[in-house]
Image: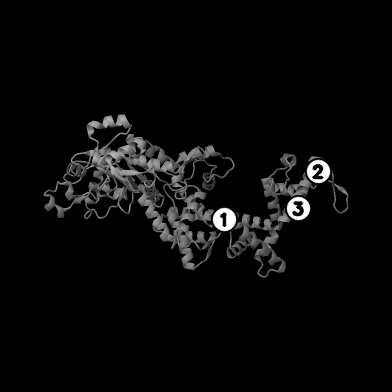
Amino acid sequence: MDILKKVQDYREDQERLKWEGTLEDYLKLLKERPYLAQSAHSRVYNMIKHKGIEEVNGRKIYKFFGNQLFGLEEALEKLVEEYFHPAAKRLDVKKRILLLMGPVSGGKSTLVSLLKRGLEEYTLTDEGAVYGIKGCPMHEDPLHLIPQHLRADFEDETGIKIEGNLSPLNMMRLEEEYGGRIEDVMVERVFFSEDKRAGIGTFSPSDPKSQDIADLTGSIDFSTIAEYGSESDPRAYRFDGELNKANRGMMEFQEMLKCDEKFLWHLLSLTQEGNFKAGRFALISADELIVAHTNESEYRSFISNKKNEALHSRMIVMPVPYNLMVTEEERIYEKMISESDIKDVHIAPHTLRVAAMFTILTRLKESDRGNLSVLKKMYLYDGQNVEGFSDADVTELKKEFNDEGMSGIDPRYVINRISSTIIKKEMTTINALDVLRSLKDGLEDHPSISKDDKEKYMNFISTARKEYDELAKKEVQKAFVYSYEESAKTLMDNYLDNVEAYCNKSKMFDPLTGDEMNPDEKLMRSIEEQIGISENAKKAFREEILIRISAYARKGKKFDYQSHERLREAIQKKLFADLKDVVKITTSTKTPDEQQLKKINEVVVTLVDEYGYNSASANELLRYVGSLLNR
């Protein structure tokens, strides 16, 4: 099988990447590639940079997080530039625990998983290669073998700063196995793996009464005490706690603030001094990034307790709010669905977008600006043009509330409701109305939403429904116009002939009688009014159209139906206005005649071929729009 061949190739690649040599060989490697001696924080920062950085609208977009985290560009830029970057430069920030704080299902766990998986991959590259003392359970940095009194000379010679002391185990091994000759100590290449507990650790709190501190720092191996004669012999100690195994890489502290205090205090010296206490040994050096995550309520409770001040001062708190952009929220749902078993169900166009509208509305806070509704704010944040507002307004609006995005409906709720709809009704096609109905039903049974929020959310469902009504009508309008493409072109040509005669103050000729006649003002105004061109503005608009036609002619290009966006929109709306009665009759009649049936089929084919519907969802859309037009 092809998969077995790929497994074999991967295994062979792993074998090729393996390296083993003495400290002397490793120092020669460092001379050629000094970046190999980077710290854990530097490794994470370089890993993120390694994937590439784009600048969009003055904001840095890190490709490392692409296609996994959506709408969190600001939070991620702050995380990288205010934590990882300075920590990589050995500034005091590296002595802090990174605490990600945000609402449930906001992307905290995904972010940590990305960092862990990224490190696993990065250590397979030349740039991210890690080397440790062979046989050491903590894959200790070989440079710890350099005696303290020679480290300043080593830094002068290589530019590499050494931090940390040789562990008790390797100190004993140096004497007993290598006779004190540091240059003979064996070094090997280390590949990070969470599964193999190498360079990546995960600690999750359990019952405080039963959980042992050994889970963090390792434990005595009582079966070896008789052999080695003492509990303080490092060979009688299992260096297998999460802090041991995460050395050189990172450790995830899940639900950190739920931990018993004795576990948290161990992190104080680790973060500040780069070491921790284990068993009856001297302090053990460890170089690792500690990432914890929590929700806002737990964090507020934690900082309100005076006993936690020392630990709190050793934290960098990074808010990870919900995404506030409709387009990005839609991408979140697409990703979650693609990973599920419901990915084969047909989801009609705009379904996820309308669900995203509702979700984003629940997360936004009402602005103090009286002329800005939450709906307009939603469109502004999504990068759409809203009359009377600019990009500068968006920047100011985001400063208005520090906690915007820290509450509201989470993505899992929406996916749960979509799944529930499909499973309960055994549906193979769902549309926006199905999802909105399911969201509404779910709110009525939701135990943790207050009565006031429930009422507010119900109103947002109504708002999303109204937005969908407009989307649905436009979709059918476009499909009808597309099916009547020739009619649209004819109407446009007719309009342009009249505009040319109007601007040149010339007469037109009746194609049947040949009689002279004035430009058809009624026809021109019926089209221009579709896009809000006033009586006073009509002359300027018509002249602008004529200038555009001349510009095209000079370049040898033909001015057509696609050449002017606003005029095309006006033509579509005019044509649809003329066709509205046809649409109403065609979509609402129970027994359409042959001609009507032909028109329905043409539009259905257009919706399927051009707009992503299937036959069932296209017919549902037509029936729904027909009912809207008949109201």
Q: Earlier in the sequence, mark 2 or mark 3?
A: 3
Q: Earlier in the sequence, mark 3 or mark 1?
A: 1
Element at label 3: helix
Q: Earlier in the sequence, mark 2 or mark 1?
A: 1
Name the residue that disc number 1 marks. Answer: 468
Q: CA distance from mark 2 to mark 1?
A: 41 Å
Q: Residue at x 17, y 53 (%)?
A: 221
Between disc 2 and disc 3, the foreground one is 3
The answer to which of 436 and 421 lies nearer the viewer is: 421
Tag 3–tag 1 contact (CB < 8 Å)? no
Tag 2–tag 1 contact (CB < 8 Å)? no
Q: Which mark is residue 441?
A: none
- Residue 102 appears in the picture as rendered: no
Image quadrant where one finds the C terminus: bottom right
- Residue 208 appears in the picture as rendered: yes
Between disc 3 and disc 1, the foreground one is 3
Give the crowd class for mark 3: few <14, some 14-19, many >=20 residues within 10 Å: few
Which amino acid lies under the numbered mark 3 shown in the image of this protein? Thr
Name the residue that disc number 2 marks. Answer: 501
Q: Quadrant of residue 29?
A: top left
Which amino acid lies under the numbered mark 2 shown in the image of this protein? Ala
Q: Residue at x 59, y 60 (%)?
A: 613
Element at label 1: helix
Tag 2–tag 3 contact (CB < 8 Å)? no
Give the crowd class for mark 1: few <14, some 14-19, many >=20 residues within 10 Å: many
Tell me where residue 590 appears, x and y as whole percent. Answer: 65, 69
Name the residue that disc number 3 marks. Answer: 490
The answer to which of 53 and 398 lies nearer the viewer is: 53
Tell me where residue 495 appears, x and y as whole percent. Answer: 76, 48
Which amino acid lies under the numbered mark 1 shown in the image of this protein? Tyr
Between disc 2 and disc 1, the foreground one is 2
